[in-house]
């Protein structure tokens, strides 16, 4: 297994760095630094997406005929690395990274013509309707129902923790169309226009003070059967395919290395009760070093996975290992950052940085978003596949238990 990058790959890396130097503006980087939630602010993400679309680099994982770059897996990995190092805002993955691959595989020609160009341009902004009250990790127990009526479905029910539903104009949903047999066998995948009568979005403000998630209600919402993706009652298969892209992507190690730099820099400025720097104390320094050891292991897992994919293989159960490892490291860093800033970790301090406010901040700039990031990051071990579910996958597929 060769983990070294070729001369051509390194030349590509320099090309990416040159592009980022000239197109990633200071205000975009500043907005990315102030992001306290899973996704960047819609306006920020859309600005960066427009720049990448113009360059032709917005969707490197798409087929070339639909706007993809034709890059190798290694080039995609390098691009993700350099964007993380440069501090670029993340693109909203719901349409481009999650729904689009589903449409490539299961969508009709009409659905591809209708939705793919608008996902790429940003004309359509999607959210995901999977979880429900009481149906999260046990998603097959979902109760939102779709009943046929002529050429339409009539949808009733609710979805919860729906990220960015307050911005979205479309939602892809799992709905129940059959109650007989296994629960997974009666689920269908639908595309719904959020402007349809009967769709209502209610905000959920988190303990971090962020409005990121919502509850979406469907009250006799009429959806054309032409908006079904895949066969009726086989949406579970479609949903599992989509989740491969929600949990994949790679490049987490690079982002976490940038976080480690931030942690060391802040800890080097902060003092303990005796006046010594936090990094001079054995206990705190040892906890940072332990995170770096875990991070190096994560980086090696990513590189070995990249080598396997580049050779024509698939990520396999490593996606579950990578997800859990990256979350554990990220939450560990957030904990140490919160400890390091001490009394500057006031609840809701991030409200100053929300909605474009530039009010005076009565603390060091580095402390501005740490509390909100810590609070928001607690959910990372649940969304995108709960930690316990990922452990079950590893136990079954890797250990044969």
Image (cartoon, helix red, strand yellow):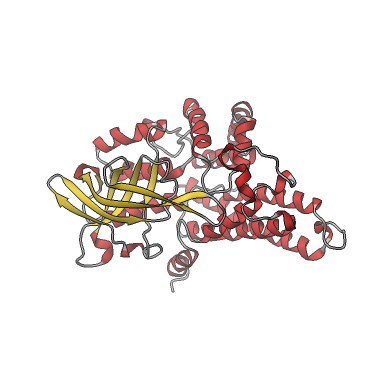
At horizontal 84% and vertical 59% (from top left) the residue drawn is 280
Write the residue at 36% across / 32% down: 118
Q: Quadrant of residue 355?
A: top right
Residue 5 at least partly seen: no
Q: Quadrant of residue 295?
A: bottom right
Residue sitting nearer the eye, 236 or 65 = 236
Res 184 quadrant in image? bottom left
Q: Nearer the viewer, residue 377 or 183?
A: 377
Where is residue 365 drawn, in percent x and y? 72, 44
Q: Position of residue 313 (x, y in %)?
A: 44, 51
Image position of 339 (left or right of 149): right
Toward the bottom, the furthest residue is: 401
Residue 355 visible to an observer of this rendering: yes
Q: Is residue 279 left or right of residue 164?
A: right
* Quadrant in which the C terminus is drawn: bottom left
Residue drawn at the location 61% of the way across and 38% of the way down: 357
Between 189 and 162, the one lying in front of the other is: 162
Residue 45 in percent (x, y) is at: 51, 37
Residue 289 vertical placement versus 213 (above, below): below
Closer to the camera, 35 or 229? 35
Tell me if residue 113 comes above or below residue 365 in the rendering: above
Give coordinates of residue 148: x percent, y percent: 16, 51
Residue occupying the point 81% across, 64% down:
282
């Amino acid at each position: 297994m060769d983990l070294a990058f070729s001369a051509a790959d390194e030349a590509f890396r320099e090309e990416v760095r040159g592009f980022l130097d000239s197109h990633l503006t200071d205000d975009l980087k500043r907005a990315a630094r102030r992001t306290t939630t899973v996704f960047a602010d819609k306006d920020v993400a859309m600005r960066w997406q427009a720049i990448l679309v113009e360059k032709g680099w917005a969707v490197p994982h798409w087929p070339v005929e639909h706007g993809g770059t034709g890059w190798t897996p290694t080039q995609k990995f390098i691009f993700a690395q350099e964007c993380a190092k440069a501090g670029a805002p993340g693109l909203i993955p719901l349409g481009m990274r999650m729904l689009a691959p589903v449409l490539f595989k299961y969508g009709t020609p009409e659905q591809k013509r209708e939705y793919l160009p608008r996902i790429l341009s940003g004309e359509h902004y999607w959210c995901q309707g999977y979880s429900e009250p009481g149906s999260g990790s046990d998603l097959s127990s979902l109760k939102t129902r779709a009943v046929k009526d002529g050429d339409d479905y009539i949808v009733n029910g609710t979805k919860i923790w729906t990220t960015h539903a307050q911005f979205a104009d479309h939602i892809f949903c799992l709905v129940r169309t059959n109650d007989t047999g296994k629960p997974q066998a009666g689920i269908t995948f639908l595309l719904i226009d959020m402007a349809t009568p009967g769709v209502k979005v209610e905000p959920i403000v988190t303990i971090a003070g962020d409005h990121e998630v919502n509850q979406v209600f469907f009250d006799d919402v009429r959806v054309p059967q032409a908006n079904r993706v895949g066969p009726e009652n086989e949406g579970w298969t479609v949903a599992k395919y989509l989740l491969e892209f929600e949990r994949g992507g790679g490049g987490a190690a690079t982002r976490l290395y940038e976080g480690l730099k931030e942690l060391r820099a802040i800890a080097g400025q902060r003092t303990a009760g005796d006046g010594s720097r936090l990094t001079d104390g054995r206990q705190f320094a040892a906890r940072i070093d332990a995170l770096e050891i875990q991070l190096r292991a994560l980086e090696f897992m990513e590189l070995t996975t990249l080598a396997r994919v580049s050779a024509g293989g698939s990520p396999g159960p490593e996606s579950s290992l990578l997800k859990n490892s990256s979350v554990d490291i990220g939450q560990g860093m957030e904990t140490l950052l919160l400890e390091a800033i001490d009394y500057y970790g006031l609840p809701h301090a991030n409200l100053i940085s929300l909605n474009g406010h530039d009010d005076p901040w009565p603390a060091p700039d580095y402390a501005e978003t740490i509390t909100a990031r810590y609070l928001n990051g607690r959910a990372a071990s649940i969304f995108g596949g709960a930690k316990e579910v990922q452990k079950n996958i590893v136990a079954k597929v890797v250990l044969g238990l």
